[in-house]
Image: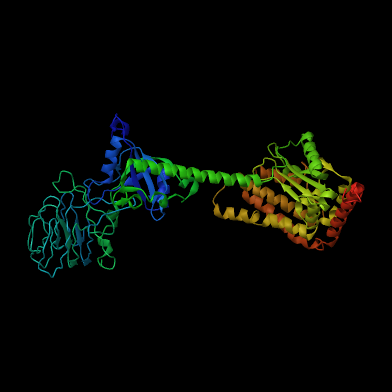
Amino acid sequence: MASTQSLLNTGPQEKSYFVVKCRNIEALKKCYKTGKWACRDRVSPPHPRCILAGSLEKGPVVLIFSVNNCHGWHGYCDMIDFPVSGDTKSDSTSKIVDSVAEDVKISHSSVKMIDSSTVDCNISYSCVAMNDGFAYGGSKSDCSAEMTDSSAAGGNKSDSCTEMIDSSVGSGNKLDSCAEMIDSSIAGGNKSDSCTEMIDSSVAGDDKSDSCAEMIDSSIAGGNKSEIGIAMIDSFAYGDNSPDSGSESKNSVITKNINEDHLKTNASNIPEKRLEETEWHYFNVKWKTIYLKEFGEQCLPSSATESFSVSDSLKVNKARNWQELPEEIGKRMCEMIDNHYSELKQKSQAKLDAQTSKRPTAFLTSDINESNQSDWQKIVDKIEVELGRVHLACPFGSQRYNLHRPDSDVDVFIIYQASTKDILGLNPPKQTIKNSDREGCDYTILELHRYCDLLAGGDPRCVETLFLHESTIVKCSQEWRKLQEKSHTFLTRQCLDKYLRDGLGSNGVKQLLRWKQEHSERKELPAKIYKLVYVIIRLLQNARDITQGGPLKVYRGVDTEEHEILMSVRHGQKAFDDMWLIVKSLLDEVEQQKDNVITDTTEAKNIAENWLLQQRYYDFSLHSCLLSDDPVK
């Protein structure tokens, strides 16, 4: 096929605008994702594919989309090539063959429907199919359908009527795009030009006039008559008259809607696959504006276009699928969609800006290097100037455990004491300051009250600070050293339970077993599973330390067994079964000795509280001289 550009006129191009009705949001999503849309022929020409192709030859074509029952306009796109059939049928004919009739001949662009039982059909008046991008192919013009009961001798027929033939008739001669329906018990009826004829099975054949439809039924077929009637069968379209067939209309479709309760034939006699084979004409589109990608089902409300008219008798909001719009109306609608879309974006950005402005600025704005003491000193200085005295500065994470790799980040852990003025005044200090997901540096800064509360409650990260290796302590106060002397008091059952909860819970062993169950045949393990097992084993090692009475081995020396096991797991050097044996062994050790762990936390709480009060009293005494006796001054 020649390219679109080569077919377009080289002179001034007029832009055409069309309404496109979309069945649902899912169909619109598919169009946006694939960049394709499609149309089907109508009952009567002109068909959408012909109209669109004709408009595209003259100039650009713009499609304005509306989703059914959403009451608005969801965007618009450019049509960038001509509709092309996506159907493989050679002559656009469809047939349903009953097992009773073995040898049925169907002429070009005609449809024969054979039923071995009872069919009860209502024929609709001036029926047009369809909408929502499901417009089915056209039917006969001035064609009324008549279905006559087999007990009746005949009936009046109109132009281009339907003829009913009993399925016991093996074949008959047909002319042009006509079909006949022959009842086995009735010999004839009144005929007129291009009319319906009911022929007894003893009659071998008869000439039929043009534009007749032939439907074959072995028993009873009856229905209401109407002008320009269309038989609807399960909403499927059949047939397509050839332009050269001599018929009055092209691409005609006979469809027949059979109520499920009325169709009493064996389902196996109807090849459903053939019912679904209806022709689509596909083309590519390029979206200009669509709400879907940012605003979901939001759209330009139809109330904004209620004053627009296609003609004196048709409002734009009532336009059917593939309705062409006046150029000025189409242009105005696209402008309104663009403006409304821009308003939504501005409101969305304003909302985002408002949320961002409420977020506190990052306390630490840059990463630090493990070996760069100046980075650490800058952090300590900043905290002491802006927050209060630093009692402890150290890393946490892999740096704390001596399990880091060259590419590991340095995570900051700091305990500070707020001033007496802040504690007693109108600006109480923040108890916890943590980085957000947007920040590159991971840090946790705890005020002394929060630290002591977590410590007394057995929080593993806080308890671990009392067992740090000297090489990992960046800064500590003499007061904190006194608290460190009481470190064993905090190895309580409460602390043990938290280690076990982290190691065995949904982010620990449970997650590991769930993954293994879902990938039971997989031999190679992903990096995330090795890291998960590494964390589980580290937690269980420290849990075992508590059951053994301590000390808590936070720092794993390079020459220790704990370090070797953890690093081999982290580097992916162990099989799943080997790692699971290590986990099981640690769990068994913890289970055997956990009853030896201190359950009473009273002493731990008293030590933490007394130490906190001592720090508060010391700071208050130090600064009390700065307080004035006269509150007015």
Q: Along the horizontal axis of the image, is 538 left or right of 513?
A: right
Seen in the picture, residue 336 relative to 267 is either above or below; the reply is above
- Name of the residue lying farthest toward the top: 10
Residue 267 or residue 430, whichever sits in front: 430
Percent coordinates x, y for residue 469 in the rendering: 82, 44
- The quadrant of the picture occupied by the N terminus is top left
Asked if residue 574 can be seen in this view, the reply is no
Give whichever of 74, 279 is nearer the camera.
Answer: 74
Whether residue 424 is visible, yes or no, is yes
Residue positioned 14% across, 63% down in the render? 168
Q: Nearer the viewer, residue 527 or 263?
A: 263
Give the image location of residue 154, x and y in percent: 10, 66
Residue 165 is drawn in which quadrant?
bottom left
How many marks the image carries: the answer is 0
Percent across and percent down for residue 396 are: 75, 45
Please state which of residues 202 and 548 is positioned toward the viewer in this rendering.
Answer: 202
Residue 558 location, x and y as percent?
76, 41
Image-based side of 358 in relation to 450, left or right: left
Give the residue displayed 25% in from the left and 67% down from the top.
264
Residue that appears at 18% across and 66% down? 222
Q: Answer with the quarter of the image where residue 234 lies.
A: bottom left
